[in-house]
């Protein structure tokens, strides 16, 4: 399959523009409000974590001392983001026109399969990471006996290879939410199998597309992180920080939801309509 990156981006921005008001409702409920409440409820913690001058060792100590309240709140925010992403994608799907309320219902229905998929992937990651780490450790140790410099170079290459491998796997799994939201598939194993087969024909160009988006996102995020941190320090209040952070988070979620739908439409092609009709 010849995946067109330009077409995907154009379609995504068009969908975002055409459905901005409806997406803004979902973005506000599931991304902006939770972020703002987190900053209001825990201003000291969130302000310190967002500070551009935060020392890494101090951050590690702070994370170690955070109680169950923080992680419980973070879990609720994570679940809200799951619902929000699926709801946005369901709203943008071309196969059926759903209301905001129906889209939210689909989002909540998707929570169990998404949590099951997370557990499956976490177990798979643990097993693969354990085996991969063992192989790398033995290989680096063997090379290190001959040359310390060669061992360092090999470690660097293997780390880069691991990063590329992780991004490639994420590319193959990137259609999880559209498959759940648009096709209505709720079986975790069926979803994983479907996204793996759906992304296979265009995995090379799709990988490049996501890498470009990832690099652009990191650059923009770093700049915004610094600006927001300096703004909060100048104003002297974390409520402003939470407000701005929530707005940015909501917009990013809206944009990426549109991107996932645009990518799905290209990959699924004519089968998307047939599958969508099955679940009407």
Image (cartoon, helix red, strand yellow):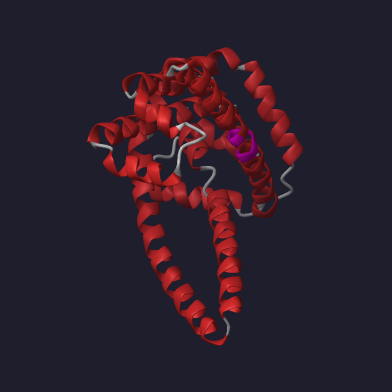
Residue 177 image point, x, y percent: 48, 37
Q: Residue furthest top?
A: 21
96 over 99 or under it: above or below: below
Q: Residue at x 34, y 49 (%)?
A: 119
- Between residues 138 and 206, which one lies in front from this camera angle? 138
- Left or right: 208 as drawn, with respect to 41: right
The magenta region covers: 218-222
- Left or right: 2 as drawn, with respect to 267: right
- Between residues 121 and 190, which one lies in front from this camera angle? 121
- Left or right: 71 as drawn, with respect to 170: left
Q: Residue furthest bottom?
A: 146
- Between residues 111 and 274, which one lies in front from this camera angle? 111
**What main secondary structure does the magenta stretch of the protein show?**
helix
Q: Residue at x 68, y 44 (%)?
A: 212
Which quarter of the picture shows residue 20? top right
Residue 100 image point, x, y percent: 46, 16
122 over 61 or under it: above or below: below
88 over 201 or under it: above or below: above
């Amino acid at each position: 399959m010849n995946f067109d990156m330009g077409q995907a981006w154009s379609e995504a921005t068009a969908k975002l523009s055409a459905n901005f008001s409806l997406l803004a409702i979902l973005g506000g409920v599931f991304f902006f409000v939770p972020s703002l409440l987190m900053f209001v409820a825990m201003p000291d913690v969130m302000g310190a974590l967002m500070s551009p001058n935060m020392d890494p060792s101090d951050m590690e100590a702070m994370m170690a001392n955070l109680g169950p309240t923080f992680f419980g709140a973070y879990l609720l925010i994570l679940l809200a983001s799951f619902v929000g992403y699926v709801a946005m994608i369901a709203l943008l799907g071309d196969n059926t026109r759903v209301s905001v309320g129906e889209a939210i219902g689909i989002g909540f229905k998707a929570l169990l399969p998404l949590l099951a998929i997370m557990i499956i992937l976490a177990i798979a990651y643990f097993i693969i990471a354990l085996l991969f780490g063992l192989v790398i450790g033995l290989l680096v140790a063997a090379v290190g006996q001959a040359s310390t410099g060669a061992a360092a170079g090999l470690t660097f290459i293997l780390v880069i290879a691991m990063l590329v491998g992780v991004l490639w796997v994420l590319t193959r799994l990137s259609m999880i939410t559209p498959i759940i939201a648009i096709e209505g598939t709720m079986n975790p194993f069926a979803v994983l199998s479907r996204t793996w087969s759906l992304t296979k024909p265009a995995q090379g160009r799709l990988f490049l597309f996501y890498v470009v988006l990832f690099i652009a996102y990191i650059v923009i995020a770093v700049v915004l992180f610094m600006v927001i941190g300096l703004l909060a320090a100048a104003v002297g209040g974390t409520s402003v920080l939470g407000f701005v952070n929530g707005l940015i988070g909501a917009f990013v979620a809206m944009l990426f939801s549109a991107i996932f739908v645009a990518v799905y439409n290209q990959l699924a092609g004519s089968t998307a309509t047939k599958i969508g009709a099955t679940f009407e």
